[in-house]
Amino acid sequence: MSNFCPRFAFLFLLVAWTAASGAEIQPSPARLASILPKGWGFLDSASADLDGNATTDFVVMVSRLGQEDPSAPRKLMVLTTDSLGALQVAKVRTLVAVNPANAGASLEDRFQGLSATSKSFSLHLGSGGGWSRFYQTFRFGWSRRDRTWQLVEVENETLEISPDGPDRTSTIVQRPPKDFGKIGIESFDPDHYLGVGPR
């Protein structure tokens, strides 16, 4: 995750990528935006077949448009497409902990982006500043039995920037059941996950 760059993609870029890749579902920006609460807009998005039904789904981070209060909640939403092409909200999680008010000293925003692969998506966060920075990737996998996306891996990376030599990085990977139990996206808290959840 050391080379992961912050990116706040506009929705039309997502749709352009979907069309270029030949994906089965190619929804318009208006179609995606129509399912959001009034006054909310997209910060970032990623697409893949998130639930294994051979259609294109989306994971998006949204916030209130024109919101000046950095402590106002953001929402992580999973949007799924059924076999008939209908788009629907599958899961929503309000995440206060990914707001600019919780950012590190020189990182403008703790939220660093989203990524997705088949039956999985990841939330990327970062903090710190100056000579030391800390990055986290929270990966969620689809559970067919529980019909939700559950936390399956957390990668913690520390970057120490040295002006006199090579930068130093260290990585700690945490997985269930050793580090945490079953945590669905609907109850996930990036600041309180260790030791949480039934095993």
Image (spheres, grey):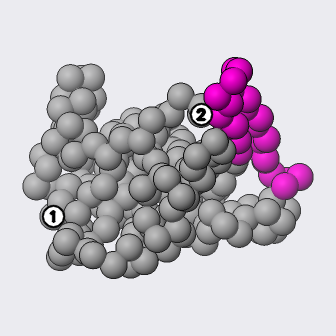
Mark 1 neighbour class, 10 Å CA radius: few under 14, some 14 to 19, many 20 or more = few
Residue 1 - label:
2
Q: Which residues are magenta?
A: 155-179
Is 123 on the left-hand or right-hand side of 35?
Answer: right
In this view, the residue in front, 141 or 143, is 141
For label 1, the residue is 34
Q: Residues within 10 Å of mark 2 (few under 14, many from 20)?
A: few
Q: Is residue 190 above or below residue 23?
A: below
The residue furthest right is 178
- In primary-sequence order, the first of circles 2 and 1 is 2
Q: Amino acid at mark 2?
A: Met
Callout 1 secondary element:
loop
Measured Cα–Cα span from mark 2 to mark 1: 33 Å
| Between marks 2 and 1 in the image, the one whose residue lies nearer the viewer | 2
Q: Position of residue 54 (x, y in %)?
A: 39, 36
Badge 1 amino acid? Ser
Count of numbered badges drawn on the protein: 2
Q: Position of residue 137 (x, y in %)?
A: 60, 45
